[in-house]
Image (tube, rainbow, N blue to C red):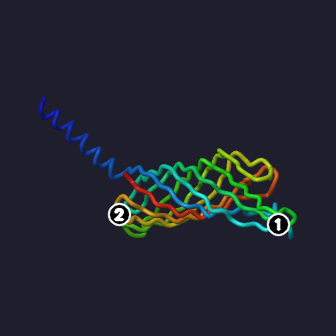
Amino acid sequence: MKKLFLAVVLFFATAASIQAQLLKIGVKAGVNFANQTGDAFDAPNVDKEGITSYHAGLVAEIKLLDKFSVQPELLYSTVGAKYKIDEVSEDIKNELGYLSIPVMAKFYLTDSFSLEVGPQASFLLSEKDDVELGDAETFEFGLNAGLGFKITENFFIQGRYGLGLTEASKNADVKNSTIQLSAGFMF
Protein backbone atom coordinates (compact mmCIF):
# COMPACT_ATOMS: atom_id res chain seq x y z
CA MET A 1 0.00 0.00 0.00
CA LYS A 2 2.85 2.36 0.84
CA LYS A 3 4.48 1.67 -2.51
CA LEU A 4 1.23 2.39 -4.35
CA PHE A 5 0.76 5.64 -2.42
CA LEU A 6 4.38 6.65 -3.10
CA ALA A 7 3.95 5.82 -6.82
CA VAL A 8 0.78 7.95 -7.04
CA VAL A 9 2.45 10.88 -5.27
CA LEU A 10 5.51 10.57 -7.54
CA PHE A 11 3.28 10.41 -10.64
CA PHE A 12 1.36 13.56 -9.69
CA ALA A 13 4.56 15.43 -8.77
CA THR A 14 6.10 14.52 -12.13
CA ALA A 15 2.90 15.43 -14.03
CA ALA A 16 2.70 18.80 -12.24
CA SER A 17 6.35 19.47 -13.04
CA ILE A 18 5.86 18.61 -16.72
CA GLN A 19 2.66 20.68 -16.89
CA ALA A 20 4.43 23.65 -15.28
CA GLN A 21 7.03 23.47 -18.05
CA LEU A 22 4.42 23.16 -20.83
CA LEU A 23 1.91 25.81 -19.67
CA LYS A 24 2.66 29.23 -18.27
CA ILE A 25 0.11 31.89 -17.38
CA GLY A 26 0.82 35.57 -16.93
CA VAL A 27 -0.19 39.18 -17.36
CA LYS A 28 0.85 41.84 -19.84
CA ALA A 29 0.21 45.51 -20.50
CA GLY A 30 1.51 48.18 -22.79
CA VAL A 31 0.99 51.07 -25.14
CA ASN A 32 -0.96 51.14 -28.43
CA PHE A 33 -0.06 53.45 -31.30
CA ALA A 34 -3.36 53.18 -33.14
CA ASN A 35 -4.70 54.58 -36.39
CA GLN A 36 -7.48 53.84 -38.85
CA THR A 37 -7.05 53.05 -42.52
CA GLY A 38 -9.57 53.24 -45.34
CA ASP A 39 -11.03 55.88 -47.61
CA ALA A 40 -13.91 57.01 -45.40
CA PHE A 41 -12.20 60.31 -44.61
CA ASP A 42 -10.05 60.80 -47.72
CA ALA A 43 -11.32 64.31 -48.31
CA PRO A 44 -8.95 67.24 -48.91
CA ASN A 45 -10.23 69.10 -45.85
CA VAL A 46 -9.81 66.14 -43.42
CA ASP A 47 -6.51 65.45 -41.67
CA LYS A 48 -6.14 62.12 -39.82
CA GLU A 49 -3.75 61.36 -36.95
CA GLY A 50 -3.16 58.29 -34.84
CA ILE A 51 -3.87 58.11 -31.13
CA THR A 52 -1.83 56.70 -28.27
CA SER A 53 -3.76 54.38 -25.98
CA TYR A 54 -3.22 51.18 -23.99
CA HIS A 55 -3.86 47.45 -23.68
CA ALA A 56 -3.78 45.08 -20.69
CA GLY A 57 -4.80 41.54 -19.89
CA LEU A 58 -3.99 37.88 -19.43
CA VAL A 59 -1.62 35.74 -21.45
CA ALA A 60 -0.81 32.01 -21.56
CA GLU A 61 1.97 30.16 -23.34
CA ILE A 62 1.53 26.52 -24.29
CA LYS A 63 4.79 24.88 -25.31
CA LEU A 64 4.10 22.31 -28.03
CA LEU A 65 7.63 21.71 -29.37
CA ASP A 66 11.12 22.72 -28.32
CA LYS A 67 11.06 25.86 -30.52
CA PHE A 68 7.28 26.32 -30.99
CA SER A 69 4.55 27.56 -28.65
CA VAL A 70 1.00 28.86 -28.92
CA GLN A 71 0.18 32.03 -27.00
CA PRO A 72 -3.53 32.82 -26.50
CA GLU A 73 -4.31 36.17 -24.88
CA LEU A 74 -7.34 37.98 -23.44
CA LEU A 75 -6.79 41.75 -23.63
CA TYR A 76 -8.69 44.98 -23.19
CA SER A 77 -7.37 47.24 -25.95
CA THR A 78 -8.31 50.73 -27.09
CA VAL A 79 -7.76 51.82 -30.70
CA GLY A 80 -8.96 54.57 -33.01
CA ALA A 81 -7.85 57.83 -34.62
CA LYS A 82 -8.14 61.60 -34.38
CA TYR A 83 -9.64 63.58 -37.25
CA LYS A 84 -9.19 67.30 -37.90
CA ILE A 85 -11.65 68.92 -40.28
CA ASP A 86 -10.82 72.39 -41.62
CA GLU A 87 -14.30 73.80 -40.92
CA VAL A 88 -14.36 72.46 -37.33
CA SER A 89 -12.17 74.20 -34.79
CA GLU A 90 -11.52 71.16 -32.57
CA ASP A 91 -10.30 67.62 -33.27
CA ILE A 92 -12.71 64.69 -33.50
CA LYS A 93 -11.36 61.70 -31.59
CA ASN A 94 -12.80 58.25 -32.30
CA GLU A 95 -11.75 55.73 -29.62
CA LEU A 96 -12.96 52.12 -29.60
CA GLY A 97 -12.48 49.74 -26.65
CA TYR A 98 -12.27 46.05 -27.52
CA LEU A 99 -12.00 42.73 -25.75
CA SER A 100 -9.33 41.24 -28.01
CA ILE A 101 -8.43 37.56 -28.25
CA PRO A 102 -5.20 37.10 -30.22
CA VAL A 103 -3.85 33.56 -30.67
CA MET A 104 -0.20 33.83 -31.59
CA ALA A 105 2.04 31.09 -32.97
CA LYS A 106 5.50 31.65 -31.46
CA PHE A 107 8.57 30.40 -33.30
CA TYR A 108 11.67 30.61 -31.09
CA LEU A 109 14.72 31.66 -33.09
CA THR A 110 16.84 31.42 -29.92
CA ASP A 111 15.98 30.49 -26.32
CA SER A 112 14.86 34.09 -25.70
CA PHE A 113 13.94 35.61 -29.08
CA SER A 114 10.66 34.66 -30.83
CA LEU A 115 8.80 35.50 -34.03
CA GLU A 116 5.02 35.73 -33.44
CA VAL A 117 2.14 35.62 -35.91
CA GLY A 118 -1.56 34.88 -35.60
CA PRO A 119 -5.22 35.89 -35.91
CA GLN A 120 -7.17 38.12 -33.54
CA ALA A 121 -10.89 38.32 -32.81
CA SER A 122 -12.11 41.51 -31.11
CA PHE A 123 -15.46 42.34 -29.55
CA LEU A 124 -16.51 45.98 -29.11
CA LEU A 125 -17.06 46.98 -25.47
CA SER A 126 -17.06 50.77 -25.67
CA GLU A 127 -17.15 53.57 -28.23
CA LYS A 128 -16.17 57.15 -27.47
CA ASP A 129 -16.25 59.82 -30.13
CA ASP A 130 -16.64 63.57 -29.98
CA VAL A 131 -19.31 63.54 -32.69
CA GLU A 132 -21.43 60.72 -34.03
CA LEU A 133 -19.19 59.18 -36.71
CA GLY A 134 -21.43 56.18 -37.20
CA ASP A 135 -22.01 52.99 -35.32
CA ALA A 136 -18.96 50.81 -34.86
CA GLU A 137 -19.13 47.14 -35.77
CA THR A 138 -19.42 44.90 -32.70
CA PHE A 139 -16.92 42.33 -34.08
CA GLU A 140 -13.57 42.81 -35.76
CA PHE A 141 -11.15 40.23 -37.17
CA GLY A 142 -7.48 40.94 -37.80
CA LEU A 143 -3.96 39.57 -38.12
CA ASN A 144 -0.97 40.25 -35.88
CA ALA A 145 2.76 39.82 -36.40
CA GLY A 146 5.63 40.73 -34.14
CA LEU A 147 8.65 39.84 -32.07
CA GLY A 148 9.07 38.74 -28.47
CA PHE A 149 12.04 38.66 -26.14
CA LYS A 150 12.35 36.90 -22.78
CA ILE A 151 14.47 39.10 -20.53
CA THR A 152 14.35 36.47 -17.78
CA GLU A 153 12.47 33.20 -17.49
CA ASN A 154 9.41 35.12 -16.24
CA PHE A 155 9.71 38.69 -17.60
CA PHE A 156 9.20 39.41 -21.32
CA ILE A 157 8.72 42.25 -23.80
CA GLN A 158 6.89 42.18 -27.14
CA GLY A 159 6.40 44.39 -30.16
CA ARG A 160 3.52 43.69 -32.53
CA TYR A 161 1.68 45.13 -35.52
CA GLY A 162 -2.04 44.41 -35.82
CA LEU A 163 -4.05 44.99 -38.98
CA GLY A 164 -7.84 44.86 -38.96
CA LEU A 165 -9.23 42.88 -41.89
CA THR A 166 -12.89 43.71 -41.32
CA GLU A 167 -14.60 47.10 -41.24
CA ALA A 168 -14.60 48.92 -37.88
CA SER A 169 -17.66 50.98 -38.81
CA LYS A 170 -21.07 50.05 -40.21
CA ASN A 171 -21.27 53.28 -42.22
CA ALA A 172 -17.73 53.87 -43.44
CA ASP A 173 -14.72 52.14 -44.99
CA VAL A 174 -12.52 52.19 -41.86
CA LYS A 175 -10.18 49.49 -40.53
CA ASN A 176 -8.09 49.59 -37.37
CA SER A 177 -4.31 49.46 -37.45
CA THR A 178 -2.21 49.20 -34.27
CA ILE A 179 1.40 48.97 -33.16
CA GLN A 180 1.63 47.48 -29.66
CA LEU A 181 4.58 47.55 -27.29
CA SER A 182 4.09 45.30 -24.26
CA ALA A 183 5.81 44.09 -21.12
CA GLY A 184 4.61 41.09 -19.18
CA PHE A 185 5.26 38.62 -16.42
CA MET A 186 4.71 34.83 -16.48
CA PHE A 187 3.97 33.10 -13.19
Q: Which of the numbered marks, if any, corresponds to residue 151? A: none
Residue at left offset 60%, top offset 64%? 179
What amino acid does circle 2 point to? Thr
The answer to which quarter of the image holds residue 55 is: bottom right
Residue at left offset 86%, top offset 70%? 44
Q: Residue furthest top?
A: 1
Residue at left offset 57%, top offset 50%? 76
Please identify, in this view, whether the residue under mark 2 or under mark 1 is nearer the observer.
1
> What SS does tag 1 mark?
strand
Q: Is residue 107 left or right of residue 165?
A: left
Q: CA distance from mark 2 to mark 1?
A: 46 Å
Q: Is residue 113 above or below residue 132?
A: below
Q: Is residue 165 left or right of residue 160?
A: right
Q: Whole-percent x and y of residue 113? A: 42, 68
Which residue does the numbered mark 2 point to in the structure image?
A: 152
Q: Residues within 10 Å of mark 2 (few under 14, many from 20)?
A: few
Q: Residues within 10 Å of mark 1 (few under 14, many from 20)?
A: few
Q: Residue furthest front?
A: 89
The answer to which quarter of the image holds residue 172 is: bottom right
Which residue does the numbered mark 1 point to in the structure image?
A: 46
Q: Is residue 154 left or right of residue 114?
A: left
Image quarter (top left, top right, bottom left or bottom right) of the N terminus: top left
Q: Is residue 96 above or below residue 37?
A: above
What amino acid does circle 1 point to? Val
Q: Earlier in the sequence, mark 2 or mark 1?
A: 1
Q: Nearer the viewer, residue 183 or 167?
A: 183
Q: Nearer the viewer, residue 54 or 108?
A: 54
Q: Whole-percent x and y of residue 120? A: 59, 53
